[in-house]
Image: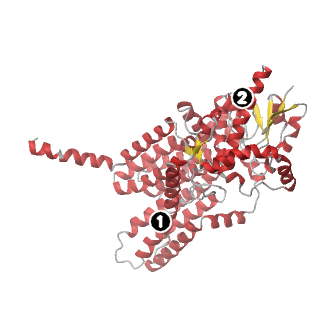
Amino acid sequence: MTSTQAAAGNPASGAHWRYFVASPTFWIVSFLVAVILGLALPIRLPLGPNYWDTDIYLDAAQRIRLGQIPNIDFFTSIGPLGFYLTAGIKAMFPQAQPALLANWAIVPVLLPIAALIAWDVDARSRRLALAILIPLLFLTSLPINLHSLYPSPGFDGFGYYNRHVALLLYLLLAALLFVQSRVLLTTLVAVLMTALFLVKVTGPVSGAVLVGYAVLAGRMRFRDAAIAAGSVIACLCVIEFTTGLVFAYLEDILDLAMLNSSSLLRRFLTLGSIKFNVIAPCLMLIGILVLAARRDKLSVLSLLASPLGWLSASLFALVLGETQNSGSLEFIGLWPVLILILKDYRRRTGDPLRMWVLMLVMAVSLPSAVIFLERGARAVIAAPRYQALDVPDVGPLGRVSLKPELAQRAIAQVDHYPKYNDAYEDLVRRGILPSATLFSEIDHQATWLLEVQQGIDAIERWETSNRRQLNGFFALDFVSPFNHLLGRAAPPHVALGIDTERTNPKVTREMLEALRDIDAIMRPKCPVEVKRAAIWKQFAQALEGRQLVALSPCWDMYLRQ
């Protein structure tokens, strides 16, 4: 190398570095490093709506560590995969912020599949590989839903499994549309369909529609689809024969279906209202593509394989799944199809419909992208002026922050609720909550964390003064955090995330026997509200023969004698 070249730098080395930075491998490795750092560092997140949903994952992780099996030893409304992944990652990063932990629990499944798809596509087109990969990493990065439940900036504490399903369906569509290797495509379909089933049962319903359409469109041979289906069934049979988990999971789903028998039309209307910003332009885009197909006089086979066919089938499949979700990355599975449309129409410079197609592609995709970016940016920008809660014994679950005025309101509410308990009992008798949006309100989620801290302080004081360590707890509430926070054993056969209207089956003999062995059944009172009262009434049999202890202003304890 001459002195002039040395001064200017090595052009070959610079080109090689730019090539690596623009490669899928660079983005995948960078994202993985960011995830590992996010789990390892003591990050404090801005508190968001329904944060207590996050505790379900911590409860499940502790139960799994103690040997309990989801769907067998405890009822849950979703599949076991997310819980096992959370338990495994938590074992490696015990101090991880739980919202990040639950959100990234799917990464060990998601990232290898994304890498295989990206590397297959990269061999033909790097731009296409990055166009598929980068949006996926972007949407996986933060615990954010695409529909906000509260105006104050914060990260969503619910909908983790719905986001996991949405991301897996994104990859399934990307594989069906762009992977060329038959062996790789068959393998990916089998793995993704198995993962979808084990995350949430609505996932494989949408997935089956997409795979079936891929066969009709000629993107996948029937024999390959049959091999993938056989592989999924074989994998589930192995799980069933070794653990009994699959049949128990299906039983839980049937029980859940009986508890959630609301009108399908109502669910479609709700989805259409919430996601009008995506569905309306998507239907308009389908209309424009119909005009183009009629003009081009496409045959039936060509129509099935066209962007029009794929967009229509994908929208139908995703609507089927999203009607059953509350909080998700709704319709991001359309993005690989939108990439296909852009790929097709980018070259049609003389087509009079090209401008309309490209405009509507942006109209379908940009609302979701902007909402995700805007909500994430607001939370990150607002975080430095937020106030931490004084909940030292709540562990990583308490590493949250919120507006100082909301924090002070939460502190005041913990003092207010016990003083005016009669007023809230009256609301219970009327069958209404203190607020119609109570659980979405960030100050209420902060109140819950302070209530849990008060409960831990009271339990420890009681144990010290009575020289007795309680063997376990069951809270008459949506979640029961004391066992994993205090290192005690959770009772088996009791549901995770108790909602008497949606996710809790009838009390059984097994439940009552398990609860008889638990020393303390805890009743929260800050506030007394209609859903907590319904849980207390449902488990009234389990309280018989126990001593009522007024443990603290916010907690009563039903003590086993």
Mark 2 against mark 1, which lies toward the viewer? Answer: 2
Question: Can residue 98 be seen at all in this image of the molecule?
Answer: yes
Looking at the picture, which amino acid does disc 1 mark? Ala
Q: Nearer the viewer, residue 301 or 177?
A: 177
Screen quadrant of the N terminus: top left
Residue under the point 74% across and 35% down: 455
Determine if residue 231 is in view: no
Q: Mark 2 — residue?
A: 489
State the separation of the CA atoms marked 2 and 1.
55 Å
Q: Residue, x 55% and y 50% (percent of image)? A: 226
Front-most of residues 496 and 169: 496
Amino acid bearing label 2:
Ala
Assign a secondary structure to mark 1.
Answer: helix
Instruction: Give the number of the disc on residue 305.
Output: 1
**Where is residue 187 drawn, in percent x and y?**
49, 46
Front in this rendered view, residue 207 or 78? 78
